[in-house]
Image: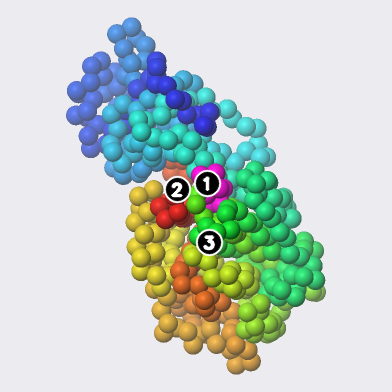
Amino acid sequence: MHPSLANSAKNAIPLHAVRARDAKAWLVRQKRSGLVIASGFAGAAGALAVLPNTKGGIAAWVLGLGDSQDGFALAAAASHLPAGTYRLGEVPEFCGGANAALAWLMGGYAFDRYKKKVARKARLALPQGVDGDEISRIAENFFLARDLINTPANDMGPAELEAAARALAKRHGAKIRIVSGANLKIHYPLIAAVGQGSDRAPRLIELLWGKENAPRVTLVGKGVCFDSGGYDLKPSAAMLTMKKDMGGAACVLAVAGMVMGAKLNLRLRVLIPAVENSVSGSAMRPGDVFTSRKGLTVEIGNTDAEGRLVLADALSDADDETPDLLIDIATLTGAARAATGMELPPFFTDDEKLASDLARLGQAVQDPVWRLPLWRGYEDTISSRVADLNNNPAYSYAGAITAALFLNRFVSKTKRWVHLDIPAWIDRPRAGRPVGGEANSARALYALLKERYGR
């Protein structure tokens, strides 16, 4: 169990949480709250105050929640309370229980690879009925994804992403296979084409775990470790966060870690096309045509639409095996951000039950996703005059949908497929969610797999 959680609440200090609209009435009901009232505490989000005991010591702490119903609000307390062990006192239902425990761990997260580590010594006694090992497992893998995304590209290229996958596989006794060099060009030509402009060799990373006769689940994650845009070069401002373009790969590794740690009853396969999209004399050019693993030819209408290319080959491989469930996660389009923002990633599927379950469970675990239509009316926008497909749709709208339709051309046998277009980034800080890498949808997907394949 994570060291920031405690099994025993003995001698623990109560921690209350109140919304702003309830703060005044709540304080009036408390003994010895005069000083807190006099100090001006009004339940503002993140505000902390001490309720004194008869000896002038600390009887309890109270955290302000503002006017929101943020399930992870207690993260603010975890990151600011002094050393000691705390237990939940009076808190609203939406931020209690398992949410409180996960929030507590989230409040202790910091990306400190390049800075001095700040020790966090505040501990939370496990709320009643909460599985500390499960919460710790979720947080550990969630933070793994954040760390991978936050690591700058000079220290997180295709080789380093492979090393992270190898470490995870070793921890859980999974098998790992790497395809690179001539074999990559033969069997995964689109992955090779995207990576050919970089001196950091592209590769396909495959991880296998679980019993062969268990239901098969395949996760595909976009692993573009840095995206310059290629010859269709991105503006400098757009390049600043492109270390996050391997966020899909980070998320599938996080989900894999949760699944393997929980020993769910499934046969897991993870596929990560790991590349860097660079500019050089050997880089792919606009107008080039490549034959994909599936046999479909693709004209390169824009070298900055590289994510769908690497995913196409990986999805084609996954589809050949016809798994029970196929999931891909990618930082694919700015259009998805324009449609639903940075905090509500869209997903696409033709499976009504899968769509309903994913939306429901995302809401339940405070990891929301939103379904967008896989609208077939836009199919003609991804056609090409010289090839089967063009990676740059001939349409200036619905970019997230047309990207999903492109990917769907490479999934023709598998009945249950879902594509998630995530930002993998937090652009406005909130409790437990600092600006930087984020494993959007990882907890929602784990909840889905646990519900379907739990022992």
Q: Position of residue 35 (x, y in %)?
A: 29, 18
Task: Identify the amino acid type marked 3.
Answer: Arg
Give me the residue at 35% from left, 30% from top.
128
Give me the residue at 59% from left, 41% from top.
111
Q: Earlier in the sequence, mark 1 or mark 2?
A: 1
* Quarter assignment of residue 261: top right
Q: Which residue is under mark 1?
A: 263
Task: Identify the amino acid type marked 2.
Answer: Arg
- Is residue 17 visible in the rendered structure shown here? yes
Contact check, label 1 and label 2, Cβ < 8 Å: yes
Contact check, label 3 and label 2, Cβ < 8 Å: no
Q: Nearer the viewer, residue 126 or 37?
A: 126
Q: Earlier in the sequence, mark 3 or mark 2?
A: 3
Task: Identify the amino acid type marked 1.
Answer: Lys
CA gap, disc 1 and disc 3: 14 Å
Q: Earlier in the sequence, mark 1 or mark 3?
A: 3
Q: Position of residue 383 (x, y in %)?
A: 55, 87
Q: Which residue is under mark 2?
A: 455
Please give the range of residues in magenta: 255-263
Q: Secondary structure at mark 2?
A: loop
